[in-house]
Amino acid sequence: MRENARPSSLNKLEPLVAETADFLKDKIGKLEIEIFTHGDADGISSSLLLASFLRLQDAPFHLRFTGPFGTKEMIRLAETQEKRKLIVFLDQGSSEVETIEKCLLQTGHQTVVIDHHQGQRLSHPSLSYLNPHFAGVDGGLEISTAGLVYLVVERLEKSLKRLGWLTLVGALGDRQEFNGKFIGANQQLLEKILGEGFVKHEVGLRIVGRRGPIFDALHFSVRPYLPGVSGNEESCTSILRRLEVERSATLEHVDEEKLLEAVLSHCSNSETMRNLLWGSIYHNHGYAHEEAAIAQACGLMGKPELAFGRLAGDPSLSIQAQAVSLEYAKKVLEGLQWLKAHLGLLKTTPVMRYLHLPVEATLAGELLSLALESEILPTELPVIALVDSGPQIKVSGRVSHLAEKRYNIGLALSISAKAVGGAGGGHDAAGAAYVPKNKLDVFLSKLQEVLRSEE
């Protein structure tokens, strides 16, 4: 597994990690702590890592799961703080550093930002800002926020090495695996965690629901989405019949490689699906790929606290999280069915494709990711989804790793949204923005202009 590792990645991060660890250690016990974390798999994993550390220090804190903060939300936050606090942003904050400076730092709050998204540099005595991009490490590809938080808390409390598996949940939730492998800092962290015995590795089927009935795992599979199988009861029944097992059969009753071939025989793009379905599986608390999928589902369904509880080991919340994940899968399958039936609505320009999606705003980006991953959508250009969200349009952008050229969709969305009075950001391959509904045409023109400049 070492051929993809970049030995210098963790070393590059070391000075920033050390500074944040020292800053955090100095403030604990002196200030009330407010944590604002992004409510996706990476943000949830990050918050559990930090919360576990603070509990060991007997340091009280208040944790909130939020969407990415915009300028208005940041101003509102500052106005509601009655006393000076230590305010921590996890998996967000990089796109709002100017507002953080004006609203929080200049009003006396101590602030920590740990975020792997692209952002502007900011130096201030009341701020610790850990962003891998400032150390020459690509946060979109090489490390998640969970990985960054782990490096900080493990430096301060060695007993938290046992939670190293949460870095995999964060990285997998943010799709930082490429052709079944991690790269850079993620790969180095993986090797370290495996070497310390806190995670086990095997090779097999990467489906959600490995302990449950095979029929359910295939029928409701959305990560990965299996064209011709997911949501298709007839195909799922045929696969089990070919293996001569009952509908209630689990993986313990079959040869996984034979099951793989049976599934691929029903998929329209079998080689692409083979790479998604078969590969490395990491487990400790649970299967990392499965925990990432469930956490992501809970976050997108507005129930991140259930995933937090599940990852923390709460049996009751674990069951509830699984139920929410099932409801999420049903919604995603409906959305993908609609997308496949309405591909004619996809508009194509020389630098991108875009369409309006009649779905919940939180689901749009995930639908694009799954549609590109399973090749429902063409992969050579960035794809943009537009969803009505009150007086605004929620914009989600994705770029496949198979794209013909290298685009930075997060930066492009940030620049274009800002030009029309909106806000956005993200990574090279994934980003989001909110723009005024009456400025949509201007925004789309600006976005194409920015993407052309990236070619």
Image (cartoon, helix red, strand yellow):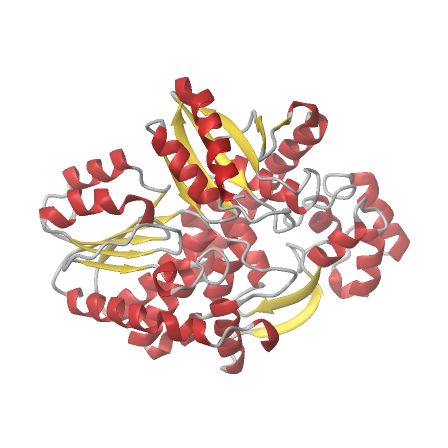
- The residue shown at (66%, 34%) is 336
Residue 255 lies left or right of residue 22; in this view the side is: right
At which x and y percent is residue 73?
26, 36
Corner quadrant of residue 232: top right
Q: Is residue 138 above or below residue 227?
A: below
**Of residues 174 and 8, which is closer to you in this image?**
8
Q: Is residue 132 above or below residue 336?
A: below
Corner quadrant of residue 229: top right
At which x and y percent is residue 181?
61, 65
Quadrant occupied by the N terminus: bottom right
Direction top: furthest residue = 438
Q: Is residue 437 above or below residue 337?
A: above
Quadrant occupied by the C terminus: top right
At which x and y percent is residue 139?
44, 58
Q: Is residue 327 visible?
A: no
Q: Is residue 279 visible?
A: yes
**Count of numbered marks:** 0
At which x and y percent is residue 422?
35, 30
Q: Is residue 346 above or below residue 406?
A: above
Residue 245 lies left or right of residue 383; in this view the side is: right
**Of residues 199 and 275, which is closer to you in this image?**
275
- The residue shown at (60%, 47%) is 405
**Of residues 369 and 36, which is closer to you in this image?**
369
